[in-house]
């Protein structure tokens, strides 16, 4: 990091070393005299029923006592992959389809992060920004928005965490092992499976929602809604199929 003024750190949420890696980034930035560290954390990092949040929170705690300029970004879950829904007519989650969640379009998050990075610590030092769109939707309501856009029924389906991880998530470590002709079980990647099970248990019992005000302020416009996101992705899907 020598000679670097700004560091943007986004940790690997499905690696057990995430906490140690993040703290090492902070300490390296301090040692090199970095002016601004922007950390991509997660919405409601304080909720420790979610295993990956524990690492994010520990990194946040180290950041706020560092001797450099810092900003913490707390995005909610990204919008779901749309193409599989277009092809199958099924919107799948590994938690209750009746629980509400806030989402964010990755492009909106990238735009907000870029603004913070470019404007620097003079404007954003010491800030922790919760970033969400304005939708608080169940899986049924998300499926309905898909259906409205594509003009045919889409149903919501809950899948067990292990099944979702093996069939639908496409995690690169798991995909590499499957591509090599090997079977995959929870014993092969215990931390990844543990994280997914904890997410399913927490989101299956509680809603996970946030507020769009901060993202609206950073973007200078209303955040992209779930339905607008689906419309954009469907237009791309049709164009690629043509």
Image: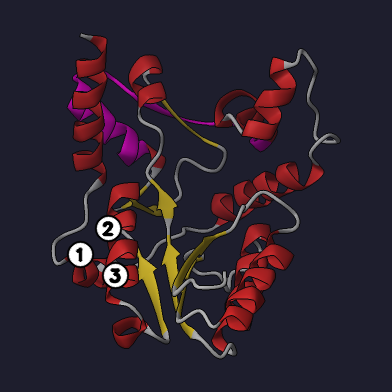
Quadrant where the C terminus is found in the figure? top left
Q: Which residue corresponds to the image point at 35% horizontal and 30% vertical from the top-left? A: 82
Question: 158 above or below 52?
Answer: above
N-term mark: 1 or 2 = 2
Q: Nearer the viewer, residue 177 or 234?
A: 177
Q: Tell me if 1 is positioned left or right of 149 in this view.
A: right
What residue is drawn where x is 23% and y is 25%? 236
Residue 87 lies left or right of residue 23; in this view the side is left
Q: Which residue is mark 2?
A: 111
Q: Are marks 1 and 2 in contact (CB under 8 Å)?
A: yes
Where does residue 155 sit, x and y in percent of width and height?
38, 25
Distance from disc 1 to disc 2, alpha carbons, whole Å, reads 7 Å
Q: CA distance from mark 3 to mark 1?
A: 13 Å
Extreme residue toward the front, this view: 3
Q: Secondary structure at mark 3?
A: helix
Furthest toward the top, the residue is 242
Residue on which the image places disc 3: 118
Task: Name the residue: 52% across, 43% down.
Answer: 96
Looking at the rendering, the stretch of residues picked out in magenta corresponds to 140-161
Specify the quadrant that holds the N terminus.
bottom right
């Amino acid at each position: 990091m020598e000679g670097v003024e700004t560091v943007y750190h986004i940790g690997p949420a499905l690696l057990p070393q995430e906490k140690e890696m993040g703290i090492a980034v902070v300490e390296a930035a301090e040692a090199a005299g970095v002016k601004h560290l922007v950390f991509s954390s997660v919405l409601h990092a304080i909720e420790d029923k979610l295993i990956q949040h524990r690492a994010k929170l520990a990194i946040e705690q180290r950041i706020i006592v560092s001797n450099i300029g810092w900003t913490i970004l707390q995005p909610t879950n990204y919008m779901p992959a749309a193409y599989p829904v277009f092809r199958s007519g099924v919107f799948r989650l590994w938690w209750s389809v009746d629980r509400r969640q806030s989402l964010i379009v990755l492009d909106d998050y990238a735009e907000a992060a870029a603004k913070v990075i470019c404007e620097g610590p003079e404007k954003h030092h010491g800030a922790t920004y919760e970033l969400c769109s304005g939708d608080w939707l169940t899986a049924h309501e998300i499926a309905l928005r898909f259906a409205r856009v594509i003009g045919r029924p889409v149903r919501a389906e809950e899948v067990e965490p292990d099944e979702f991880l093996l069939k639908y998530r496409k995690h690169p470590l798991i995909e590499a092992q499957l591509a090599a002709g090997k079977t995959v079980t929870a014993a092969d990647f215990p931390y990844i499976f543990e994280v997914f099970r904890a997410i399913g248990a927490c989101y299956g019992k509680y809603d996970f929602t946030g507020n769009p005000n901060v993202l609206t302020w950073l973007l200078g416009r209303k955040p992209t809604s779930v339905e607008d996101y689906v419309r954009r992705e469907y237009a791309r899907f049709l164009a690629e199929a043509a």
